[in-house]
Image (tube, rainbow, N blue to C red):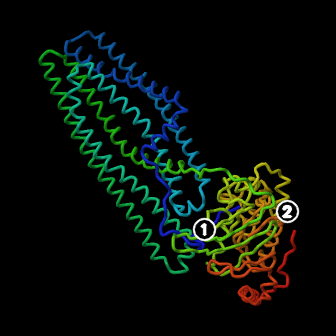
Amino acid sequence: MSVPPSASARGTGGTAGPVLLPVATPARTRAAVAALLRPQRPLLVAAAAVLVGSTAVGLLVQPLLGRIVDLAADRGPVDALTVTAALLAAVAAVQGVTAGLGLSLVSRLGETTLARLREKFVARALTLPLERIEKAGAGDLTARVTADVSLIAEAVRNALPELARSLLTIVLTLAAMALLDWRFLLAALLAVPVQAATARWYIARAVPLYAEQRVAGSAQQQQLLDTVTGSATVRAFRLEQEHTERVVGRSRALVALTVRGVRLVVGFYGRLHVAEYLGLAAVLVTGYWLVGRGSASVGTATAAALYFHSLFGPVNAALALLDDAQSATASLARLVGVTDLEPVTGPAPALPAARAEVSVRGLGHAYRPGHPVLHDVDLTIRHGERVALVGASGAGKTTLARLVAGIQPPTSGTVLVGGVAPAELDPAAARRTVALLTQETHVFAGPLSDDLRLARPDATDDELRAALDRVDALGWAEALPDGLATVVGAGGHRLTGGRTQALALARLILADPPVVVLDEATAEAGSAGARALEKAVARAVDGRTALIVAHRLSQAATADRVVVMDAGRIVESGTHDELRAAGGGYAALWAAWSDNRDTRDTRPPRA
């Protein structure tokens, strides 16, 4: 079964601009991350313990170097120098092993958390109402599931382990300086106000800038999708220049934001260098003063200076990773914003009875306020009845079909299937009740049998063959290189438009819903295959309540009843013969359509 195209592509209306999917607040994002980490507390504690131990061992290097300086200054014994050098080698070995283990644990923690977030995002995105996705634009959802996920993954694999190690190194190094002499710590802390001011200055500008970049990236991707997917229409109406200008405009806006980000980072590093030189100068002066007073040895002063100098890398890394952290946080908020979208809660309506009747009363709908596309529509489709919707483009046929299928709730009036509004059913119940087929059927990559089992995962091979046989598709399916095991879709065997639609009809039979909505489901078939596909449609919907947006009037001729729409209203209703005899709008449509056509066999037998 297929997904309907966007409203803008089908002429059914739309919003004045995309209504982007929500973005979570910082507090909500933190809460979501905490919830994801909660089941992994043992791994979190183990990673923290190993990293703390590794960092503490590494901090023994500076005192050992200071010891070597003191031994050299005092002309100490060679054996003492040898022992100190051996200790340095041992420290390096232990730190290397523990650091590798700690970083691997942090990476495992981050990857597991990201995988759970990604699973929640995909699960929620797949249950979003199509109306919500259409209003946001495919580019917004695509950017979140590609660019945002990639950016977070990059941060988890690289930035998170480095940031954790850097922060631990900073804290423990400052503690070690205090152990040497508390005055060394005070001297080192002179750099903190400059670093704190730098971080605050950067964050205040980076957070809105990166959020703006994400939105601009979504807008650029949406424009590219619109231009590429609609390239045939763009060329047909000579709109190449206009669309090129739109793409260029969106790209330039994104480039301008990127340049602003580069300038921001340059200013950020310039301020950090000032803090480094200020702190190092203070530590050296303090060491000179303490050695002169006899309060510290030359080796101790050397160790303090080395400690502070060793902070350059971790401090710069931690503050520089704010750049990645801000980008990742902005992306994370966009993912959490989608995972937080919950279906409307309320008492679950009872499933419609097997004999599902469709009742439409006082139906009105507008994609934009003040621009209605349906007006006071009343329609009843009895159980097992096949009703064809016909009318000129823009008459409201597709909108009515979408509302009956439960793609979105109507603006006014009611749509009931077996006494229940389809838009109120949960997704699983809705799939069992109403099936929608459009001309845009997707073939998923994988074996043909797996593609069919999307409709019923427990279907046997015999049931798959029976469904294909019912729509006259078994012959070509078994003639494929590997039969039903043939890989189709992207990278596999390509199916023609007619075969793709037959595949969708076979899925429909396997799903076995009581109500079927077909929105020009045979439009992709060429003239040669149209008659065969229409016969397959007749077999697939036999015994079901069916609403068919007729692409060809031959479909209307075989329906139990024909409903003619014009300007969002039902203007005629009756059988094919009744409406032809009435001499109204349908008769005129039939005469225009059947001119120069052989209409003697327009009624394929019902299965």
Residue 296: x percent and y percent? 18, 17
The percent position of residue 389, horizontal first and vertical second, equals: 72, 76
Indicate the secondary structure of the residue bearing disc 2.
Answer: helix
Asked if 189 appears above or below 446 in the picture, the reply is above
Looking at the image, which is closer to me, 14 or 244?
14
Q: Position of residue 209 (x, y in %)?
A: 36, 54
Give the crowd class for mark 2: few <14, some 14-19, many >=20 residues within 10 Å: some
**Type of amino acid at the residue the image marks with label 2:** Asp
For mark 1, does the 10 Å Cα neighbourhood hold few (<14), some (14 to 19), or many (20 or more) residues?
some
Near-viewer residue (81 or 385) = 385
Residue under pointer 2:
469
Q: Are marks 2 and 1 in contact (CB under 8 Å)?
A: no
Q: Residue 374's spot in the image, x, y percent? A: 61, 74
- Residue in view at x 28 percent, y 49 percent: 266
Q: Amino acid at mark 1?
A: Ser
Does label 2 or label 1 sit earlier along the sequence? 1
Q: What SS does tag 1 mark?
A: strand
Q: Is residue 253 visible?
A: yes
Residue 475 versus residue 320 in the image, above or below: below
223 vs 539, left or right, is: left
What's the residue at 53%, 57% (across, down)?
Answer: 142
Q: Name the residue carrying label 1.
A: 412
- Residue 83 is drawn in which quadrant? top left
Q: Which residue is at 49% across, 44% downward?
A: 153
Q: Quadrant of the C terminus?
A: bottom right
Q: Residue at x 73, y 73 (%)?
A: 525
